Every structure is written in C-alpha cells, then in structure tokens.
Image (cartoon, rainbow, N blue to C red):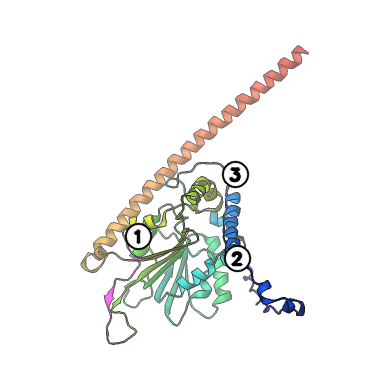
Amino acid sequence: MQDPLPTQRPKKPFQPTATASAVPQSARKLPRPVFIGGFLLGVVACYGIYTYKATGLGEDVDPSTFDVSCRYNATAGTFDRDVDFTERWTGIVRLRQELVEQARGHVLEAAVGTGRNSAFYDFDRVKSLTLLDQSQEMMEVAKARWQETNPDEPCRFFTQSALDPLPASLDSEDRGYDTIIATMSLCSTPMPQLFLRNLATGLAPSIPTASTNSTDADPILRPRILLLEHGRSHYSWLNKLLDVTASSHALEHGCWWNRDIGQIARESGLRVLDIRRKHFGTTWRLELELPDEAQGSGRQRWLADTREKIVQSKADFEQKQSDLGKQMKEQDKVRRRDADLEKWRREQREKMKKRGN
C-alpha cells in the first residue's frame, strides 16, 4: 500500500521588508524586454534539459513497430516528482485545469496516468467519473491521489488499454459518455489515430435538447473529446531537435514527443472542432466530436467498422513486434559473434607480442 500523496503547504504571501520598500518602485521592476527575454530563455532551457536527459541511447526506433508505453510501469513512483516543476513553470497545470473544468455529464478520462487532473473536476457539472489507464502502477498512484483530493466523491477505476472496448458509462439510457478527456496520451500509444477513434466509440450521440427555451441550454447536446497534448512545433528548428532525440526519449520516458498531433486528429476520421497551440506550438489543445457517419442510422455500422479496424491493426502491430523481436535477437547474435571475434584477435596479438619478446 502506497503512502498517501503529500499535500502542499500554502505559501505565505511575500511581505516586503523596510529595506525593500525604500527602493524606488521603478528600480524594482524589470524592463519588459528583459522579462520576456528571460522567459523565452527559460523555456529553451527546459527543452534543453529534456533533450539532455533524452540522449544517450542512440537507437533509431520506428514508432510503428515499438510499444514504449510499458516504460510508465517503471516510472510511476517518480513520475510526479519528475514533471511537476516543469508543468507548473510552463503553465501546463493551468491548461489541465482549464480543460478539465469543461467536463460535464458522464465523464471518462483515458490514459489517466497518476491522476494529475483529479483535483480539477467540478462535481456540480459531472454526474459520474470513470478513470482508465493500462498501467497498474500508475493507476495505484492515481487512486491514492483521488483519496487525497476527492475522498467524498465516487469514481470508477479501470486498468486496461484505451484501445480495448471501453467500459460502459453510468448513463441510465446507456447512451455513452458526454465528455471524454485525455491529456498527454497520444505520445505514448503505438496507434494514436485508432486510440482517438476508439475513444469516440464511447461518446454518446448528439441529440436535440428537450427544451430550447432555456437561455443557457445548447440547441444541440454535443458530446466531445477534449485533449491536451504535446508534439511538433510551429518552428522547423525545434522540430529537428525533437526528431533527433525522439527515439532515445521514447525508449527512456515512453513518449514520442515529435508527433504531429493535428495530423493524427484529422486522420482519426473524427470532426475537429477546435485546435489551439502554445509553447512554440508544441502544446496542443483540441476539441473533437463524432463525424456525421457515426450519428443516427449509421452509428452501428461505424462502431462495427471501427472495432474491426482496431482488431486488425492490433494483430498487425503484434506481428510487427514479433518480427522486431526476431530481428533484434539476430542483431544481438551478430554483435556477440563480432565481440568474440575481436576478443580472439586481441588474444592472438598478445600471444605474438610475447613470442617476439
């Protein structure tokens, strides 16, 4: 049983001393260009630190043949400590809060990780909440955090892949979820397009409201997928940096940080309602909904087609994994053979030196 997550002590407000108050106000303010320049330098420094940590493995890994999500089993215990400072300093925590506060109705959060969004749900708007992650180790941390932040609120926890059939919502009419949330998730799944499409199978269909006279009621109930992701930048120089370090970063941290999130969303076949980007374009906030063909009479056909595609793609991926494993074994045999040959050559050279002496 894990210890409960520590609560942060509130910081005392800063009280200026008499010496500080004697300094003229104009002298205490940083000029705007200096502040902006320092901020940008700090952001670049953060990326530099991440890049430094990512290098060192030096392997070129094809993301379509290698599943790195298992890395989170090993990092669950230190994950929050590793990312907390950077997420707070760059404003990711605030972006998480803004996203999650939009959740309403019956809500599913996929790839919940350690539950970093748990404190932001508004239960005046949320009827039920279901949290899902395939890592048992991450889910244990998420459960502990939930008991720390929301001990009186009910929540369901499922340990499974978001590529498997989703748990049914608690909607009385079994319609599906009104809101599905995923944050920092597309970087770790081997099939991001199908990941989104499978999430969409859990969305309730859009239906007209019972009353359109209310001033605060939407004419259409629009179940949505809300995403906060990180990926490719607006800038080519930064994309080159992400590309160079992508494989080693993925192997170490379980995250492909150079994916084109917008392209993934479009290729999923879902309707993209909104895309907003920050941090040189590397932070993506998206809003998606079901396409027209998944509504009305075509819904069942669309659901069946999606499940068929996912099953076939998972089978293809497992075959690629098997082929990759065989290839890596053969390469390991060659490396061992070459190492043995080099060792024999060194021994022969040493023997010849001794004979010569």
User: Is disc 2 surrounded by few (<14), some (14 to 19) or many (20+) residues within 10 Å?
Assistant: few
Quarter of the rendering containing residue 167: bottom left
Q: Amino acid at mark 2?
A: Phe
139 or 283: nearer the eye? 283
Relative to residue 232, is residue 39 drawn left or right? right
Q: Which residue is mark 2?
A: 35
* Residue 79 in view of the camera: no
Q: Position of residue 232 (x, y in %)?
A: 45, 54
The residue labelled by disc 1 is 197
User: For mark 3, what is the residue?
Assistant: 56
Quarter placement of the N terminus: bottom right
Secondary structure type for disc 3: loop
* Nearer to me, 186 or 69: 186
Asked if 303 appears above or below 323 in the picture, the reply is below
Q: Main secondary structure of the magenta part?
A: loop
Between residue 280 and residue 175, name the one nearer to us: 280
- Is residue 206 one of those drawn in magenta? yes
Earlier residue among tags 2 and 1: 2
User: Tag 1 or tag 3, which sits nearer the N-term?
Assistant: 3
Mark 2: secondary structure = helix
Is residue 308 one of those drawn in magenta? no
Q: Is residue 63 visible?
A: yes
User: In 3D space, how far apart are the residues under numbered discs 3 and 1 (Cα atoms)?
Assistant: 35 Å
Say above or below: 10 vs 267. below
Q: Position of residue 55 (x, y in %)?
A: 58, 46
Q: Quadrant of residue 146?
A: bottom right
Q: Indicate which label's residue lies in the foreground, 2 or 1.
A: 2
Q: Position of residue 25 (x, y in %)?
A: 67, 76
Kindly identify the amino acid type of the residue bearing the numbered disc 1.
Answer: Arg
In the drawing, does residue 233 fall left or right of residue 37? left
